[in-house]
Image (tube, rainbow, N blue to C red):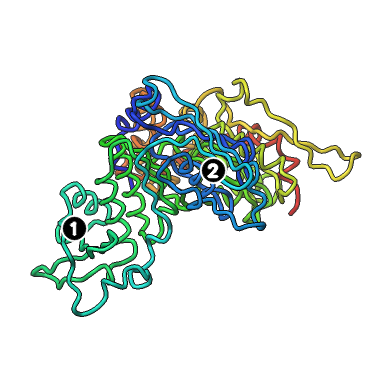
Amino acid sequence: MKSEIRNSDITGLFTRVNKRAYDKYLRRVRLVKLRGFENREVNFDFPVTALVGPNGSGKTTILGAAALIHQGVVPRRFFAKSGKYDESMKNWRVEYEILDKREMSSTTISRTASYLAAKWNRDAVERDVLVFGVSRTLPASERKELSRFIGSGFTGFSEDQLTKPVIDAVEAILGKDAAAYLRVNSGEGGLSIFASQATEESAGYSEFHFGAGEASVIRIVSQIESAQDHALILVEEIENGLHPVATRRLVEYFIGVAKRKAIQVIFTTHSNDALAPLPNEAVWVAYRGEIKQGKLDVASLRALTGQINARISIFTEDRFDEIVADVTLRSYCQKHGLDRSGIEIHKLGGAAPARDHTRFHNSSPARRFFAIALLDGDKRTESGFEPRDVSISHSEDENKTFPDIAFIPGDGDPEDFIIDRILAGIKQVPTLLGKLTISLHLDSFMQESVRQSVIQRSYTTGDRHNIFRQIGEDLDFLSEELVQRAFITTWAYAFPEDVDEMWNQVRPVLAQQA
């Protein structure tokens, strides 16, 4: 499912943050000491930020740190102390860089929150902050404070229709008509529930008969639309109670309202669907006391934290490189009699995240297997991407090592390299065009159409990242991934020397037995 958010909107929001064009904005949090974190930093480069990590990794700690410096948030909401059982809280400290044009017009201001002995000391700032905890998805019937709404004789103190922005957003997220929803107020303590009015098609019903996700979305959207511009929105486990499509649409709503109302959103999640609309820089991964920037899917995270029975993990820059690794490893292991099973491959959303996560993983004394970063050829000569030797020896006598980074052949984008090799192969290898056609799931009489498409697109495509999609459009609208896999497979088996170049240096670790 493709995101509804335009690239121009993403770019515009990045630009707004860089230009500091906010009345209020949390720019940076430094966890000097907080629970399992020491001297770790999170930069909020994009106004919608996802915090990813396994259970107990510290996602909520970071979320709470973001909330802590604001006057309207009570510290015990995230960091409660239970007498002598929480002595570890002593000397906790968090430092902040904040935009607040009421105090300073152009630069960030510094603030600190610390727990010295018996209480929090906060140099707090004023900002409208909304916190949506996991309890928001509890069914209304399980929330004791809503018991006053129960009873056959209950009538609300007042009723409010949802505003048009709320209706439009709820309809877009849930994919259903929201015009019949209203808020029912009790008249005491500011409590309310939602209800759906009766229509010609259905009887009316209260929130006690809503799905948990349905009520959660309406409540989140209603409060955000009522919040002040430049507010801070904090959401725990955004996907709770939601279908994957609704989860993605809710994040798209956050991006849209960040543009419209200049709000900032930070949420925790275990869902890849929640990450899909976000740029790479908007995602932070927490695990084992570390915080790393960069999009990381849940399967990759499980590999990094040792929650899979892998023998080796390969971390790549993107989905295309992930396919390259899969296809070429099958070819290489088959040729050299190695065991392909137990080798996990995961994309990490960029060269730097792939390198950094690989090195952090390999350096961990708790790791149960080794990792390799597979990067594009253009990184081969780029500063900071020099491979480092990793020892796999069990004794000083063996002294076996392998480089922690392998490179796809060529000195540029792998798409360029593979297309050029296929073009050369069509002229040099008589059977290559036929094998490519079969790999594309096309009949043999389509060979000439395949040849013409490859040659023409090699001349006319300005960005080679798009060439496989365009070739697919030429050939009866084949899917882009089918075309990518067909070209990679044909290249790998036609040019085994390229595959050997990729994997020979890391063969010692590939040959390791489980």
* Quarter in which the C terminus is drawn: bottom right
Instruction: Find numbered disc 2 in the image and state the secondary structure of the residue it sits on.
Output: strand
The circle on residue 285 is 2
The circle on residue 376 is none
Instruction: Find numbered disc 1 in the image and state the secondary structure of the residue it sits on.
Output: loop
Measuring 33% from the left and 61% from the top, which residue is drawn there? 213
Q: Quadrant of residue 120?
A: top right
Q: In this view, does 307 lie to the left or right of 258?
A: right
The circle on residue 178 is 1
- Binning the other alpha carbons within 10 Å of mark 2 as few (below 14), some (14 to 19) or many (20 upward) gives many
Measuring 68% from the left and 35% from the top, which residue is drawn there? 404
Q: Which kind of residue does numbered mark 1 sit on?
A: Ala
Q: Which of 268 and 458 is in front in this view?
A: 268
- The answer to whether residue 95 shows anywhere in this view is yes
Q: Which kind of residue does numbered mark 2 sit on?
A: Val
Query: Residue 207 location, x and y as percent?
Result: 26, 67
Q: Which of 332 and 260 is in front in this view?
A: 260
The vertical placement of 108 against 26, above or below, is: above
Q: Which of 296 and 193 is in front in this view?
A: 193
